[in-house]
């Protein structure tokens, strides 16, 4: 019976109206693609221009924008099935066996549906948003560029894109530098020799941090009233070869912290050289076996 139905269906398709139906399918898909391009451009423009004005998280709109492809093409597919008689009959037959088909599709698409559901949870609970600077496993750091139905796109500082499935990033430990406050502490650690003047070294590190243009004053009103230093410098370890010092300064963002740290390592080294502060390194004595044998 099924074989007879399929033969009748295909014979209905392959007739004098085949070209007309084929043109209809092509035109419908072309219109769907055009509508999708227009809607995505409109959505992108609205997101970029209005997200800051109305103080709404752009992640919500970005997720909706990336859902347009599925919605538009699904509607186009329904239109095609509804307007071609043979496909409409074939669709009815598929609907009759929807239970088996759903089981097959569900088994084959477990990960895809899992990514979609996880993406919705990310949208609701917002462990990160578009524009946040995050760090995931293996020390990969970057800015969240896009959140789609299936994956999250992260742009790292080499301008490379890290594409992570939503289920993977949801199970990962995420360090978010922007979730509530974009300010970040920049830590600069330097070791000096035991013979060097610790107080002078700490003063140099504090001075170099305070005059850096990217540094900000993150003291509370109480700390300011007590005239506590803007930059805290402390001895953090008495190591085998050095006295390790750390300066804690604050910047507006992760990118500023990285830039300030690289600048300070250079300027502090230059000041130490001028002020006679030694940065030690371990000395190694190499003894060749042939020299021992001669002795």
Image (tube, rainbow, N blue to C red):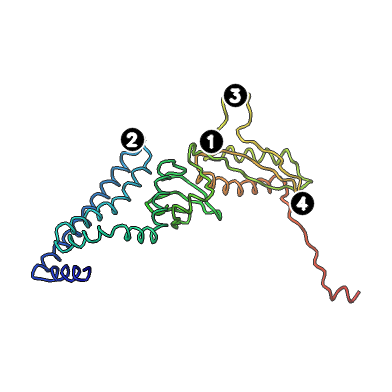
| Of pointers 2 and 3, the one earlier in the residue sequence | 2
Q: In which quarter of the image is residue 11?
A: bottom left
Residue receiving disc 3: 222
Residue 238 image position (x, y, % from top left) = 76, 45
The answer to whether mark 4 and mark 3 are in CB contact below 8 A is no
Q: In the figure, 211 relative to 10: above or below?
A: above
- Front one among 107 and 230: 107
Residue farthest along the right direction in this orientation: 295
Residue to which mark 4 is pinned:
241
Mark 1 vs 4, N-terminal side: 1
Q: At 56% from the left edge and 24% from the top edge, which residue is drawn?
A: 221
The number of numbered discs placed on residues in the rendered structure image is: 4
Please provide percent x and percent y for residue 14: 13, 71
Label located before the other in sequence (1 or 3): 1
Q: In this view, does 259 lie to the left or right of 41?
A: right
Q: How far apart are marks 1 and 2 (CA)?
A: 26 Å
Is disc 2 in contact with disc 4, using a CB cutoff of under 8 Å? no
- Give the camera-side residue of 67 and 44: 67
Q: In the image, which is nearer the foreground, mark 2 or mark 4? A: 2
């Amino acid at each position: 019976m099924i074989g007879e139905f399929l033969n009748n269906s295909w014979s209905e398709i392959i007739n004098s109206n085949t070209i007309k139906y084929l043109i209809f399918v092509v035109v419908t898909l072309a219109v769907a693609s055009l509508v999708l391009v227009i809607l995505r451009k409109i959505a992108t423009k609205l997101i970029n221009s209005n997200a800051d004005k109305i103080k709404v998280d752009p992640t919500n709109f970005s997720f909706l924008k990336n859902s347009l492809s599925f919605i538009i093409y699904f509607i186009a597919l329904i239109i095609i099935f509804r307007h071609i008689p043979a496909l409409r009959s074939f669709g009815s037959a598929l609907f009759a066996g929807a239970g088996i088909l759903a089981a097959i599709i569900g088994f084959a698409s477990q990960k895809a549906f899992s990514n979609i559901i996880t993406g919705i949870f990310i949208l609701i609970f917002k462990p990160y948003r578009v524009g946040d600077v995050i760090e995931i496993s293996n020390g990969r750091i970057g800015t969240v560029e896009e959140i789609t139905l299936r994956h999250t796109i992260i742009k790292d500082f080499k301008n490379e894109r890290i594409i992570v499935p939503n289920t993977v990033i949801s199970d990962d430990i995420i360090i978010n530098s922007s979730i509530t406050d974009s300010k970040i502490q920049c830590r600069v650690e330097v070791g000096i020799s035991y013979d060097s003047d610790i107080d002078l070294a700490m003063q140099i590190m504090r001075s170099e941090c305070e005059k850096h243009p990217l540094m900000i004053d993150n003291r509370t009103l109480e700390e300011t009233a007590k005239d506590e230093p803007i930059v805290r410098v402390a001895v953090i370890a008495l190591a085998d070869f050095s006295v390790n010092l750390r300066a804690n300064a604050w910047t507006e963002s992760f990118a500023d912290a990285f830039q300030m740290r690289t600048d300070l390592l250079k300027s502090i080294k230059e000041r130490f050289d001028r002020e006679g502060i030694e940065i030690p390194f371990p000395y190694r004595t190499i003894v060749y076996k042939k020299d021992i044998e001669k002795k």
